[in-house]
Amino acid sequence: MQIAKITEYARALYAAHGDKAEAEAAQKAKGFESRGDVASAETWRAIRRAIKEFRGARAG
């Protein structure tokens, strides 16, 4: 997935779930990984990292 799309998903997830968005993304990644969908799991990990960066930028 492209960086722009990952950022878009991260912002939408954060808007929908607030501070729980990072945990939601982690849960999605874990679910895909447990089903053997490594590519989707990595996408959700990237989304989680983007949320974490976004949250950090807002805190500073």
Image (cartoon, rainbow, N blue to C red):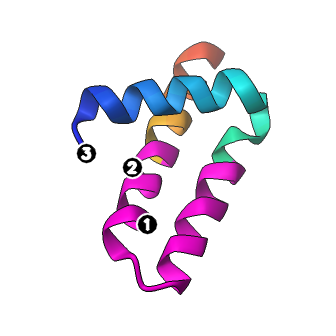
Query: Which residue: 69% across, 39% down?
Result: 21
Looking at the rendering, the stretch of residues picked out in magenta corresponds to: 23-48
Read off the residue under disc 1. 41
Query: Which residue: 58% across, 24% down?
Result: 12
Q: Earlier in the sequence, mark 1 or mark 2?
A: 1
Read off the residue under disc 3. 1
- The quarter of the rendered structure image containing the C terminus is top right
Q: How dense is the environment of label 1, judged by Cα within 10 Å: few (below 14), some, or many (20 and up)?
A: many
| Quadrant in which residue 3 is drawn | top left
Give x and y (percent) for residue 49. Answer: 46, 45
Q: Amino acid at mark 2?
A: Ala
Most extreme residue toward the left is 2
Q: Nearer the viewer, residue 55 or 11?
A: 11
Give x and y (percent) for residue 20. Answer: 77, 41
Give the side of residue 23 with respect to residue 10, left or right: right
Read off the residue under disc 2. 46
Q: Amino acid at mark 1?
A: Ala
Give the side of residue 36 with respect to residue 27, left or right: left
Q: How dense is the environment of label 3, judged by Cα within 10 Å: few (below 14), some, or many (20 and up)?
A: few
Query: Which residue: 51% across, 32% down?
Result: 10
